[in-house]
Amino acid sequence: MKVGTDGVLLGAWAAVQPQDRRMLDIGTGTGLIALMLAQRAPEAHVTGVDIDDVGQARENAAASPWSGRVAFAQCPVQEFETPEPFDLIVSNPPFFVDSLTCPDRGRTAARHAVHLPFGDLCDAVLRLLAPGGRFAVILPTAEAERFLAVCAGRLALVRRTDVRTTPRRPAKRALMEFVRADRPADRPADCSAAVPEVSELVVGTGEHECYTPEYRALTCDFYLKF
């Protein structure tokens, strides 16, 4: 799959904290989000995992300034093992659930939740996420509600940004950040009872190829450095 707005948005929006040292990109594809995280977190080591070939991701990492801190593994995340949990996990996952699949098997794997159902994604995040870690994901708005239902009582939503392509169009995507529902530390034991931070982002002004100041502010660091 080509680089798209979804990946750029998630890579720029995901909260990166100074203490984060281990990050995971589930369904890394070309390695775009993994490289954005490496750019934003100079002390972190980033791993990208994908069920498909990760050769292009490795080539992109090798051509970047962060090649020493980015690694990729071709493996279903359901089978992915790690000696230490991750402080931050991100994913731009396959999301279509009920729609017709495409004859192109590669495109189907990238866009349809065939090899990575939402339940499996939630299970993988809980298995690989550190106790105080965060998980960030981008999904179409309808699929976001399905994912929230799957995660109920297991992952607690703490931040959400609904994304409109233009001011007059309804929200098309939801950026969501979760913590473990049993997370101790700085949050109540029942994180599901906490009120998440909710915001909205409009990508375009409605004029041809004219982005809003908010979108430019979110993504400018990425575009300036690549």
Image (cartoon, helix red, strand yellow):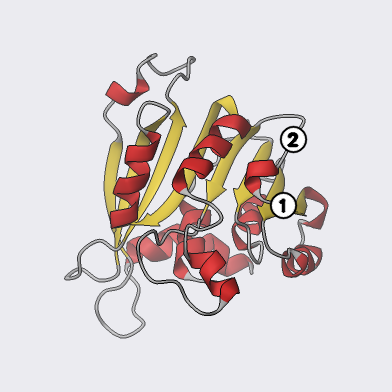
- Give coordinates of residue 107: x percent, y percent: 54, 73
Q: Which residue sits at x=35%, y=73%?
A: 211
Q: Is residue 151 above or below residue 69?
A: above
Front residue of 88/64: it is 88
Q: What label sits on residue 217 in the rendered view?
A: none
Front residue of 178/44: it is 178
Q: Which residue sits at x=47%, y=20%?
A: 183
Distance, label 2 to label 1, CA atoms, is: 12 Å
Q: Quadrant of the N terminus?
A: bottom right
- Asked which secondary structure carries label 1, the reply is loop
Q: Which residue carries the number 1 mark?
A: 75
Quarter residue 127 falls in: top right
Other residues around mark 1 within 10 Å, as few (<14) / some (14–19) / many (≥20): some
Picture mark count: 2
- Give coordinates of residue 217: x percent, y percent: 42, 60
The answer, for residue 1, to whether it is visible in the render is no
The answer, for residue 194, to whether it is visible in the render is yes
Chain-order first, disc 2 or disc 1? 1
- Asked which secondary structure carries label 2, the reply is loop
- Give coordinates of residue 61: x percent, y percent: 76, 62
Quarter residue 33 falls in: bottom right
Amino acid tagged 2 = Thr
Q: Which residue sits at x=73%, y=37%?
A: 81
Q: Which residue carries the number 2 mark?
A: 82
Q: Which residue sits at x=54%, y=31%?
A: 126
Is 167 positioned to the left or the right of 184 in the image?
A: left
Amino acid tagged 1 = Cys
Q: Quadrant of the C terminus?
A: bottom right
- Give coordinates of residue 130: x percent, y percent: 60, 27
Q: Is residue 180 above or below residue 207?
A: above
Other residues around mark 2 within 10 Å, as few (<14) / some (14–19) / many (≥20): few
Q: Residue furthest bottom?
A: 208
